[in-house]
Structures are given as C-alpha cells and as structure tokens.
Amino acid sequence: MNASFEPFRLVNAYGAFGSVSRRRDEVVLEGSTARSPGPDDWVEYAFRGKPGDVRRRPPQVAPYHLRLDWQMWFLALGSAGGGWFERLLLRLLEADAATLRLLRADPFADDPAGPAPRWVRARLYRYRFTTREERRRTGDWWARHELAVLVDPVDLARMRALLGRDA
C-alpha cells in the first residue's frame, strides 16, 4: 500500500511501523489452582485489548495505550522479554493486585481454592478473524490454533528460583 502512494508524496508511513504483518500471533497466559493440572484445569487471563477468548468482540481501546498488551504483542512477534515477562509470571503467581489491575479480569478472584494460581503457563496461538459463515454458525469472532508452548507450567517456588529470589 505504501508503495502505491509514495510517488505522489502526499502522505507517508508514520511512526515505528509503516506496515503490520498479516499474521496475528498472540501469547495466551493461563493459570491453574489444581495440584496436578490436566488439560481442563487451566483458565485464561483476559487482557483489555488482546483477542483472548474467541467469542469476545474486538474492543475499541483508543485513545488509550495499553502498555502490557503492547509488550505482549512484541513478545508474540519474537522479541526477547528482557526479564519483564518472567516478572509478570511471578506477579501472577503472587496474585499481585497492581499487576492484576492491568488485566481485563482476574480469573482467580472468586476461586474458592484461593486468589492465586498454583501454576501459570504461556502458549502461542495464531489468530484470524472468522469468516461470515463461521461467525453466523459459531458466534465466534476469532479462530485460533496453537503454535507452541512458550512456558511450560511453572509454580511460585520455581519462578522465584529462576529469578534468583528466596522461595
């Protein structure tokens, strides 16, 4: 698109990104309160501006800049976390109130097993918008499939050890 209007010198690609990839890869964070979690024991953390739940309508977030969501987008693009991502996982395991306020909702807030998960993990998905036919049939806004496990299940003691903190 940029090349098509460049000869006219009317506009240009402004900002850090003159183009955005057509693929939508997303890191999905999940937690579990089970002692030994099975496939059905995981719940997703919901972000304010990220797709997450395939049934959720894409939100309008402007004029806000959701910095955590933005950093998660870079992580999905292959950017090294630089330590912030590991600290985020630790804060989720600690049920840190300030961190949880950055999210759309805390899935463990009303959990009888406690306000904090025993385990967290991170998985990478490829998202795409559903077709009109898929949307009519399922009600889903998104279709997704798993690409990789980014972080295997980790508990609080292991996360603290990885970050060099006392357990």
Image: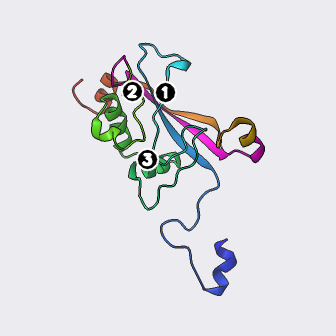
* Label 3 vs 1, first from the N-terminus: 1
Residue at the (34%, 38%) spot, across then down: 100
* Label 2 vs 1, first from the N-terminus: 1
Nearer the observer: mark 2 or 3; the answer is 2
Under tag 1, what secondary structure? strand
Label 3 to label 1: alpha-carbon separation: 25 Å
Q: Name the residue beneath numbered marker 3.
A: 80
**Discs 2, 1 touching: Cβ within 8 Å:** yes
Q: Amino acid under label 1?
A: Val
Within-10-Å neighbours for mark 2: few <14, some 14–19, many 20+: some
Relative to 138, is 116 on the left or the right?
left
Within-10-Å neighbours for mark 3: few <14, some 14–19, many 20+: few
Q: Name the residue beneath numbered marker 2.
A: 108
Q: Quadrant of the N terminus?
A: bottom right
* Residue 149 numbered tag: none
Of residues 34 and 56, the one nearer the viewer is 56
The x, y position of residue 148, in whole percent, is 57, 34
Q: Which residues are magenta?
A: 112-134
* Label 2 vs 3, first from the N-terminus: 3
Q: Name the residue beneath numbered marker 1.
A: 43
The x, y position of residue 95, in whole percent, is 31, 30
Within-10-Å neighbours for mark 1: few <14, some 14–19, many 20+: some
**Discs 3, 1 touching: Cβ within 8 Å:** no
Under tag 3, what secondary structure? loop
The x, y position of residue 147, in whole percent, is 61, 36
Using the rendered view, name the quadrant where residue 89 is placed: top left
Q: Amino acid under label 2?
A: Phe
Nearer the observer: mark 3 or 1; the answer is 1
Relative to 21, is 134 on the left or the right?
right
The colour style of the image is: rainbow
**Discs 2, 3 touching: Cβ within 8 Å:** no
